[in-house]
C-alpha cells in the first residue's frame, strides 16, 4: 500500500477528493493540517449528516493506493489540473503492513462513564474499580460509548437509576442506553429503532450483557403506552419532529432525556417541546448537550380523590 499525501486549502478539498476517487484511490481522508497547534480549528457535525464543511483552512488529504506507481501517477495528474492551484504534493509514502484487526481494536479502549461505570470492549479487562460494566464492541449500529451524546445519556442513567421502572429507548442503535438502564435496575426496557440491523444488534448486545430478559428490541411500533423514563439519542431534526410522540410516551411525573443536540440547537428544541414539557440543558460535552425534562403530574380532581 502507498499513501499520496497532499496539503490543500479548504476551497480545493471537494474537487481534489472527487478527482482522487476518479483516479481509483482505495480511500481518501481529510485531516486538519494544524491539529494540536494553536491554529487548530474544531468542526462539529451531527452523526449521520454531511459534515458542516468539506475541510479546514489548511487540510491534509491522504489517499491510499494499491502500489507506488498508481500513487505517483495520481499525484502527477493532479498537479496538471487548474483546480490544484494552492495545493501542494507532500510525498508518496509506503504504508507498512499491519495487523488491521489488532490496530482497530487498539483504537477502542475502555470508556469511563463514572468512576464505577465503564464500557469495556470484549478484548479488554474491566478496570478494578468498575462496578457496572457494559461489554460492547464497535459495530454497524451507532452507539459505542465514545461519542459525547452517549456518554452523557449513560451518565444521566447512572445518576438517576431507573430502579423498577419501565423505560423506552427510542432510536436504540447498538442498545447501549437500554443495556445501561437495565443494569441500573429497570424492570423492562423497550428498545426501538427504524433500522432492523440496530434491532438485531441490540438483541445480541443485551444477551451478551445478560439483560436479554429485560431488554425487548423491536421496530418503533412496539413502543406502547407510558414509560417512567424515555431516552432518545438521535439527532436534533428528528427529535423536533418526534416531540408529540415522545412526550405522549412519558407518564406524568416521568423523565424525558434527549441527546444528539448541538449547543446552538438548544432553543429550537425548547420551543418544539414547550407545549408538553419544559426542556433544560442538563449536561454539555465537546459542543453537544443533554436536555431533560419532567412531565407534569396529573392534577387531582375532587372525583379522582373519592
Image (cartoon, rainbow, N blue to C red):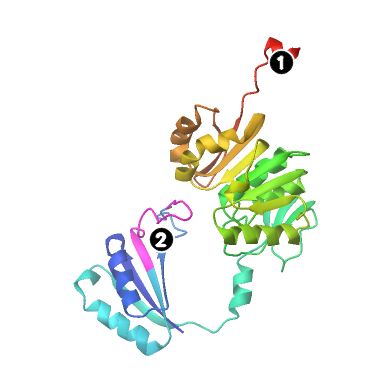
Image depth: mark 1 or mark 2 in front: 1
Where residue 92 appears, as percent x and y from the top left, is 38, 82
* SS type, badge 2: loop
Pick whichever, 201 or 183, lies toward us. 201
Label 1, label 2: how far apart the Cα atoms are = 65 Å
Q: Quadrant of residue 252?
A: top right
Specify whether 98 is left or right of 65: right
Which residue does the numbered mark 1 point to in the structure image? 304
**2 within the magenta span:** no
Main secondary structure type of the part rendered in magenta? loop
Q: Quadrant of the C terminus?
A: top right
Specify whether 123 is left or right of 192: right
**Range covered by the magenta-colored residues:** 43-60
**Residue 292 in view of the camera:** no
Specify whether 106 is left or right of 134: left
Which residue does the numbered mark 2 point to in the structure image? 34
Where residue 300 appears, as percent x and y from the top left, is 68, 15
Amino acid at each position: 500500500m502507498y499513501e499520496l499525501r497532499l496539503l490543500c486549502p479548504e476551497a480545493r478539498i471537494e474537487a481534489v477528493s472527487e478527482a482522487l476517487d476518479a483516479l481509483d484511490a482505495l480511500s481518501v481522508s481529510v485531516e486538519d493540517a494544524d491539529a494540536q497547534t494553536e491554529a487548530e480549528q474544531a468542526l462539529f457535525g451531527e452523526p449521520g449528516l454531511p459534515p458542516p464543511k468539506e475541510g479546514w483552512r489548511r487540510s491534509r488529504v491522504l489517499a491510499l493506493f494499491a502500489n507506488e506507481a498508481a500513487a505517483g501517477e495520481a499525484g502527477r495528474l493532479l498537479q496538471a489540473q487548474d483546480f490544484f492551484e494552492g495545493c501542494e504534493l507532500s510525498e508518496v509514502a509506503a504504508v507498512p503492513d499491519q495487523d488491521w484487526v489488532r490496530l482497530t481494536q487498539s483504537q477502542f479502549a475502555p470508556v469511563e462513564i463514572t468512576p464505577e461505570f465503564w464500557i469495556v470492549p470484549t478484548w479488554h479487562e474491566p478496570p478494578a474499580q468498575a462496578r457496572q460494566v457494559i461489554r460492547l464492541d464497535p459495530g454497524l449500529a451507532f452507539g459505542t460509548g465514545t461519542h459525547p451524546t452517549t456518554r452523557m445519556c449513560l451518565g444521566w442513567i447512572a445518576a438517576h437509576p431507573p430502579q423498577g421502572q419501565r423505560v423506552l429507548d427510542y432510536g436504540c442503535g447498538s442498545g447501549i442506553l437500554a443495556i445501561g438502564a437495565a443494569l441500573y435496575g429497570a424492570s423492562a426496557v423497550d428498545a426501538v429503532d427504524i433500522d432492523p440491523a440496530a434491532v438485531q444488534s441490540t438483541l445480541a448486545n443485551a444477551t451478551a450483557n445478560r439483560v436479554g430478559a429485560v431488554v425487548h428490541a423491536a421496530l418503533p411500533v412496539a413502543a406502547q403506552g407510558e414509560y417512567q423514563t424515555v431516552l432518545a439519542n438521535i439527532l436534533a431534526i428528528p427529535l423536533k419532529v418526534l416531540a408529540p410522540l415522545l412526550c405522549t410516551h412519558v407518564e406524568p411525573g416521568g423523565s424525558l432525556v434527549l441527546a444528539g443536540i448541538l449547543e446552538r440547537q438548544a432553543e429550537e428544541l425548547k420551543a418544539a417541546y414547550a407545549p408538553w414539557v419544559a426542556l433544560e440543558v442538563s449536561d454539555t460535552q465537546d459542543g453537544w448537550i443533554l436536555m431533560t425534562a419532567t412531565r407534569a403530574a396529573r392534577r387531582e380532581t375532587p372525583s379522582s380523590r373519592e
